[in-house]
Image (cartoon, rainbow, N blue to C red):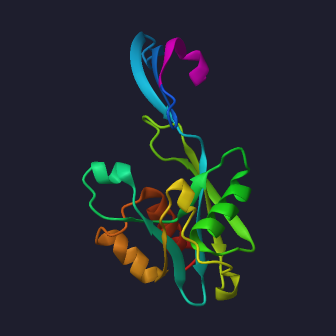
């Protein structure tokens, strides 16, 4: 039996479409024992995105960014988040979008990049699926200073870190962003072995 056979959507109501879309939905769900149960859920649709970890195998370094994230701040995180470059797809392919985001945020124009997986980051409430990429960089690929687009509110610092330092920053709590942790763990297991 597919999920489509186990759900009957009864009502969908738009709560907000200010920046992204927030809806509340009432549906009946057919439980594993065959009984139908009415449930209510909110879903936040911000679109799908892509993220990328530039790495330099010879130098054993990665490029990350540091920026302010209001939702993390209001949840008690009083620091700038260290993250992998990322952005929403905005009707572009994942590869096209992440190349543009990497250039805007880090200043690097990468050659070959590789998609490694896709993941839902918070499937209990957010519809977003991220496309994860890695790509090797060299210093000569830096064509700008990065920093993001100021008119979009971006104020981004570019960081070049040793992979061992970045991994240690996960352990000591300086890197707390899930997509970044996933990319760094992938790199530790598959690139910097």
Q: Quadrant of the N terminus?
A: top right
Q: Residue placed at 58% from the left, 62% from the top?
A: 149
Report if residue 165 is visible in the image: yes
Looking at the picture, tell me which residue is in the foreground, 82 or 173: 82
| Residue 12 drawn at (x, y percent) | 51, 16
Above or below, 160 relative to 15 = below
Looking at the picture, tell me which residue is in the foreground, 6 or 97: 97
Which residues are drawn in magenta?
1-15
Q: Residue placed at 63% from the left, 62% from the top?
A: 101
Above or below, 3 relative to 79 = above
Of all residues, the one furthest to the bottom in this rendering is 58
Does 152 appear in magenta?
no
Of all residues, the one furthest to the front in this rendering is 151
Q: Residue placed at 43% from the left, 57% from the top?
A: 178
Does 10 appear in magenta?
yes
| Residue 44 drawn at (x, y percent) | 48, 34
Based on the displayed image, in which of its 4 quarters is residue 109 positioned? bottom right
Report if residue 193 is visible in the image: no
Magenta-drawn stretch, dominant element (helix, strand or loop): strand
Total numbered badges shown on the rendered structure = 0
| Residue 130 drawn at (x, y percent) | 57, 50
| Residue 48 drawn at (x, y percent) | 60, 44
* Left or right for 156, reference 50: left
Looking at the picture, tell me which residue is in the foreground, 97 or 150: 150
Q: Residue placed at 60% from the left, 83% from the top?
A: 56
* Left or right for 53, reference 25: right
* Left or right for 70, reference 142: left
């Amino acid at each position: 039996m597919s999920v489509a056979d186990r759900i009957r959507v009864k009502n969908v109501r738009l709560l907000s479409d200010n920046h992204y879309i927030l809806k509340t939905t009432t549906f009946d769900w057919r439980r594993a024992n065959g009984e139908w149960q009415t449930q209510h859920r909110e879903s936040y649709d911000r679109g799908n995105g892509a993220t990328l970890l530039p790495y330099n195998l010879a130098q054993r370094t990665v490029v990350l960014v540091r920026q302010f994230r209001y939702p993390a701040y209001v949840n008690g995180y009083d620091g700038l988040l260290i993250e992998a470059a990322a952005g929403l797809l905005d009707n572009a392919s994942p590869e096209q979008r992440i190349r543009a985001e990497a250039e805007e945020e880090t200043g690097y124009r990468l050659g070959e990049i590789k998609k490694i997986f896709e993941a839902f980051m918070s499937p209990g409430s957010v519809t977003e699926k991220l496309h994860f990429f890695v790509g090797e960089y060299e210093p000569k690929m830096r064509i700008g200073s990065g920093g993001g687009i100021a008119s979009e509110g971006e104020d981004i610092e570019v960081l070049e870190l040793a992979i061992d330092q970045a991994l240690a920053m996960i352990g000591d709590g300086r890197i707390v962003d899930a997509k970044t942790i996933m990319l760094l763990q992938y790199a530790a297991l598959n690139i910097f072995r």
